[in-house]
Amino acid sequence: MQSIKLFAFLFLLCGCVPYRSPDRMQWGKYLSGASFADMTEISRTAKRPVYLGAGGKLLSTAVDIPDSMDYGDKNTNDNLIATKYMTDLETTLYDSLRKPGISVQRAGTDVLVILVRDAIMELSVADISATGDETLKTISNILKQYNATFIEIAGYTDSMRDSNAAYALSMDMAQRVGVYLSQHGINTTRMFIVGRGAARPIAAQDNIGRLTNRRIELRITPVR
């Protein structure tokens, strides 16, 4: 019995216990402060006071701004600061996430991380896989470093006969990732969580393409 307890202790100590999402009834607690809406300019503006009230940072207070930025056009300087900040974030994510099923892209000053479902979740169970645990932990650590950002977590599925089922599945994936990020220190007032069902496919709806269309997209944008 003592040897079994010792083995269990060492197993826990080495961090070998697989991650499991909390019971669904507890998700509301972990996602308190998150917005369940698209991350639009209007929704970001509305969320900004809540975010700041929860200790969130603006880009202007999160980076060291050179004295030279005191001169010239303010909008131009703000865009230069945002571009530099998000370029550094993109590079850090890209260098840290070189794995199959994951891509990092730029869209203006936004950074988009595409996570194919099978790259972060169990094949036959709706939960985060061991590989996904490692990947999302890496993302969490980077997002804590680049914390002057809002994050949209959007779930997508492949084409399904039942659009309601497609929406429910995509929302389940998005919320699971949101819960994980919350558990790993990401301020939930930074989050916008949405399920988009089979909308916006990025591959053909054949056997191979379906695996790509089942995905999570993290869109990260600076808070100004």
Image (cartoon, rainbow, N blue to C red):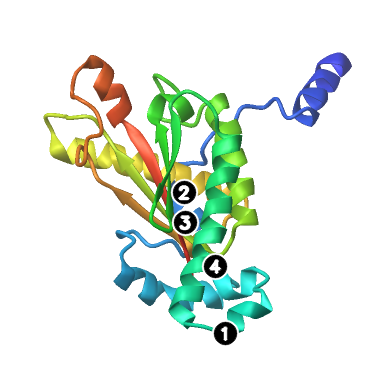
Percent x, y of residue 125: 41, 24
Q: Is residue 109 above or below residue 78?
A: above
- Which residue type carries mark 2? Gly
Q: In this rendering, which labeled residue sits more in front, label 2 or label 1?
A: 1
Residue 81 circle label: 4
- Which residue type carries mark 4? Ile
Distance between mark 4 and mark 2 Cα atoms: 28 Å
The residue that disc 1 covers is 71
Q: Is residue 166 above or below residue 32?
A: above
The residue that disc 3 covers is 31
Q: In this rendering, which labeled residue sits more in front, label 4 or label 3?
A: 4
> What residue is shown at x 54% (from left), y 67% (from top)?
81
**213, 88: nearer the viewer:** 88
Could you tell me if residue 24 is visible in this image? no
Q: Is residue 127 above or below residue 79?
A: above
> What residue is shown at x 67% (from left), y 74% (from top)?
66
Q: Residue furthest right?
A: 2
Left or right, 98 with reference to 79: right
- Which residue type carries mark 1? Tyr
Q: Mark 3 and mark 4 in contact (Cβ < 8 Å)?
A: no
Distance between mark 4 and mark 1 Cα atoms: 13 Å
Quadrant containing the N terminus is top right
